[in-house]
Image: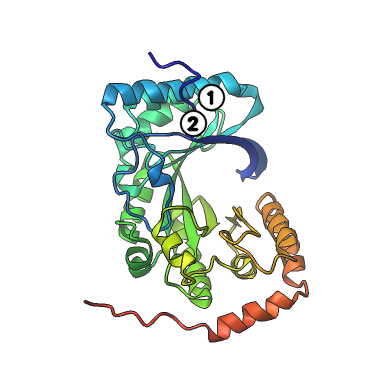
């Protein structure tokens, strides 16, 4: 028997998100699972946070213990939205046993739920059964499936990320969700490995435009350097720099789509950063913008005069891509 004190989620925290026109209190939970089956994305450190070589019954009991921990540490009245992440895909029954998924669904019934999964696990029977568990009729869209599309460019996704899926796979999953009455949250990644700063900006602008017709919510994730990843290998050798916060502002100001952004690690060497002097102000402005979509907030900091802005502009003009062979 696994006690409550032996198992808890990898991480959990309270925050706020703008959902359906309202700023709502959000509980974010990252569950420890048997891990992502793909397990190859170049920038992902969560794939190492998993139970290794575990039997299904043991996995079920350990994950149920995590849910008991959530129940014991967070009052239901304190949050309106639940964001669920795992080491891989919440809707992969091999990673998250059905009993675990059902138990969590019962616990958070009546909430708006955003659950992350790879596209191949977004099937009508699975998401419909989970929707039935959580839906009380109180919300226009009680469930959103969140997918890490990262970019609409299949070449970038394959070569720079090694995602193992295509834009067509994402579209198919989004259509499946739509037919089941489930919303779609799309995660895009700013500046994966091997892209120059200007290439990353151009890719994000195109990706937002092309992903928008299939998305109810769009979030732009600014790439961070996680430990034990391919990305870290190159970063330690001076072959990668996380995106400038100036670049994030440039992208957000270029689109009429409502794109949220949480600059995780902003201002630090492993995260999106400028020079250190203007980082905090810009990071705070982006966070505030994501709760209101008031463009004046980010326009004001974009017009800030800082020496590093000239550096950023120089990088955009002169940074060259790696001359890498496309074949062996």
Of 52 and 261, which appears nearest the observer?
52
- x then y, percent, for residue 185: 48, 48
Q: Residue at x 50, y 50 (%)?
A: 216
- Taking 322 as reference, is 244 above or below it? above
Q: Residue at x 36, y 63 (%)?
A: 157
The image quarter containing residue 49 is: top left
- Place residue 35 in its image quadrant: top left
Q: Quadrant of the C terminus?
A: bottom left
Looking at the picture, tell me which residue is in the foreground, 141 or 79.
79
Q: Is residue 56 left or right of residue 136?
A: left
In the rendered structure, are the residues bearing label 1 and label 2 in contact, judged by CB atoms less than 8 Å apart?
Answer: yes
Q: Which residue reaches farthest left?
A: 328
The percent coordinates of residue 266 (x first, y second) are 63, 57
Q: In the displayed structure, does residue 16 sit left or right of residue 194?
A: right
Disc marking residue 179: none
Tell me if I can see residue 42 in this picture: yes
Residue where numbered disc 1 is placed: 70
How dense is the environment of label 1, judged by Cα within 10 Å: few (below 14), some, or many (20 and up)?
many
The answer to whether residue 27 is visible is: no
The residue at which mark 2 appears reads as 9
Query: How many residues crowd mark 2 within 10 Å: few (<14), some (14–19), many (20+)?
Result: some
């Amino acid at each position: 028997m696994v006690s409550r004190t032996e198992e808890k989620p990898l991480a959990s925290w309270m925050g706020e998100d703008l959902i359906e026109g309202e700023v709502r209190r959000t509980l974010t939970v990252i569950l420890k699972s048997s891990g992502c089956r793909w397990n190859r994305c170049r920038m992902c450190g969560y794939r190492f946070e998993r139970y290794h070589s575990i039997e299904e019954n043991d996995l079920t009991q350990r994950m149920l213990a995590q849910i008991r921990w959530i129940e014991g540490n967070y009052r239901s009245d304190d949050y309106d939205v639940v964001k669920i992440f795992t080491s891989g895909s919440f809707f992969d029954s091999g990673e998250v046993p059905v009993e675990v998924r059902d138990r969590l669904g019962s616990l958070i019934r009546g909430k708006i739920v955003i659950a992350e999964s790879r596209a191949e696990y977004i099937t009508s029977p699975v998401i419909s059964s989970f929707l039935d568990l959580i839906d009380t009729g109180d919300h226009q869209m009680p469930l959103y499936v969140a997918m890490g599309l990262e970019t609409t460019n299949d070449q970038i996704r394959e070569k720079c990320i090694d995602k193992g899926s295509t834009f067509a796979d994402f579209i198919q999953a989004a259509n499946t969700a739509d037919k089941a009455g489930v919303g779609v949250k799309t995660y895009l990644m700013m500046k994966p490995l091997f892209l120059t700063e200007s290439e990353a900006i151009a890719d994000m602008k195109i990706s937002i435009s092309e992903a928008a017709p299939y998305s109810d919510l769009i979030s732009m994730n600014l790439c961070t350097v996680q430990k034990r990843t391919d990305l870290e290998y190159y970063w330690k050798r001076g072959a990668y720099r996380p995106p400038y916060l100036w670049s994030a502002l440039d992208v957000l100001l270029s689109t009429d789509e409502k794109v949220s952004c949480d600059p995780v690690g902003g201002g630090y060497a492993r995260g999106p950063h400028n020079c250190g002097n203007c980082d905090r102000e810009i990071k705070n402005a982006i966070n505030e913008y994501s709760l209101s979509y008031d463009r004046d907030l980010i326009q004001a900091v974009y017009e800030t005069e800082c020496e590093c802005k000239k550096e950023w502009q120089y990088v955009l003009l002169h940074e060259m891509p790696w001359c890498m062979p496309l074949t062996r």
